[in-house]
Image: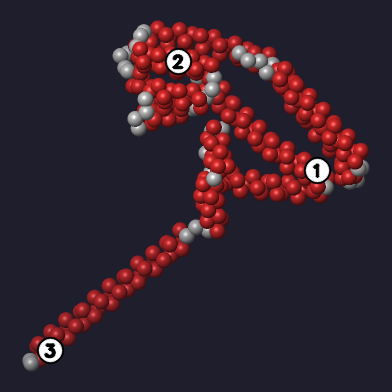
């Protein structure tokens, strides 16, 4: 074997060795970067707790009801976050209230928090429904203009969904999604009316369903509904303005009751705990609280006017 061949073989071997070392170093660098990226993207214990709680809650009936309540209240909070924050608030409130008034006060505070949270969800849901009803005249006008331009009812609903604002936009988008997956327009409209119960929407849905089934001059009917809805909206606003002072009385009564409890607790050291430890004081506390609650309910019933 000549010296030239030996030198060429050594050069080839050296080149192959250098290339192998370079490739190995590059692969190790890539593996290290993947490891660092995986460690950075690895969820923390809090994220793992949230995801696990989310899966468990959505598997049972109570979690699904909470998800439905959040959707109806137009809240996009995750179910797990809502549940964990609620539990933390209840635990902290129980600890603080136990130090103030003892175990009876703990039960009272926790009950008020649960009732207040449920009432807040219901009030937000009612506010969303009221806002949707306020937008019904514009919705009827959009449908009337679209149908008068020669569009079908389904196409008119799509145009109205693009031109509307929330919450009407979200409800019409959901309606269009149901129609896109094969649902009939009658069933989709009836489900929307069931999600947002109101007499105005029921009338509008009935007109649209009748037109979809039997046909007719829908433009004339929609223009008439638009005028009627605008009249009812103006009347509802006037009634709400007249009843605003009476509704503020409910808040004043609730604030007065809470202020009296704080005055009893601050006037005497440990006064609230002493009051709740005595059977007579406990009876007085619950009787007075029941009277305050009865007064608030009666004021709310008197000031609630259906239009």
Say whether residue 290 is left or right of residue 201: right
Label 1 to label 2: alpha-carbon separation: 51 Å
Choose mark 3 or mark 1, whichever is in front.
1
The percent position of residue 54, horizontal first and vertical second, equals 53, 48
> Is 303 drawn above or below residue 125 in the view shown?
above
Depth check, front residue: 242 or 4: 242
Q: Vertical placement of 220 versus 294: above or below?
A: above
Q: Secondary structure at mark 1?
A: helix
Q: Secondary structure at mark 3?
A: helix
Q: Earlier in the sequence, mark 1 or mark 2?
A: 1
> In front: 267, or 228?
228
In the rendered image, residue 192, in percent from the top left (x then y), is placed at: 47, 25
Which residue is label 3 attached to?
6
Crowd rating for badge 1 (residues with CA inside 10 Å; few <14, some 14–19, many 20+): some
Which residue is painted at 42% across and 11% down in the image?
Answer: 222
Residue 271 visible in the snapshot: no
To which residue does mark 1 refer?
105
Which residue position holds label 2? 206
Q: Earlier in the sequence, mark 2 or mark 3?
A: 3
Q: How many discs appear?
A: 3
Q: Tell me which numbered mark, 3 or 1, is placed earlier along the sequence.
A: 3
């Amino acid at each position: 074997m000549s010296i030239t061949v030996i030198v060429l073989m050594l050069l080839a071997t050296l080149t192959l060795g250098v290339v192998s070392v370079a490739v190995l170093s590059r692969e190790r660098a890539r593996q290290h970067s993947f490891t660092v990226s995986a460690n950075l993207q690895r969820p923390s214990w809090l994220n793992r707790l949230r995801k696990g709680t989310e899966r468990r809650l959505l598997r049972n009936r109570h979690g699904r009801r909470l998800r439905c309540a959040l959707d109806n209240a137009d809240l996009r909070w995750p179910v797990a976050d809502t549940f964990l924050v609620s539990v933390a608030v209840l635990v902290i409130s129980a600890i603080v209230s136990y130090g103030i008034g003892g175990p009876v006060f703990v039960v009272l505070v926790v009950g008020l928090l649960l009732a207040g949270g449920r009432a807040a969800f219901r009030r937000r849901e009612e506010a969303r429904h009221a806002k949707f009803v306020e937008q019904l005249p514009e919705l009827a006008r959009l449908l009337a203009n679209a149908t008068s331009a020669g569009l079908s009812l389904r196409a008119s609903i799509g145009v109205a969904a693009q031109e509307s604002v929330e919450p009407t936009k979200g409800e019409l988008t959901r309606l269009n999604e149901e129609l896109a997956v094969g649902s009939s327009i009658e069933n989709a409209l009836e489900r929307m009316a069931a999600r947002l119960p109101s007499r105005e929407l029921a009338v509008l849905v009935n007109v649209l369903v009748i037109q979809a089934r039997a046909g007719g001059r829908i433009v004339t009917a929609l223009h008439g509904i638009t005028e009627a809805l605008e009249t009812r909206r103006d009347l509802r606003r006037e009634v709400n303005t007249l009843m605003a002072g009476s509704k503020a009385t409910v808040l004043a009564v609730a604030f007065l009751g809470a202020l009296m409890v704080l005055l009893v607790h601050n006037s005497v050291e440990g006064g609230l705990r002493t009051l709740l430890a005595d059977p007579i004081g406990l009876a007085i506390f619950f009787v007075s609280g029941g009277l305050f609650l009865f007064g608030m309910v009666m004021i709310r019933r008197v000031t609630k006017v259906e239009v």
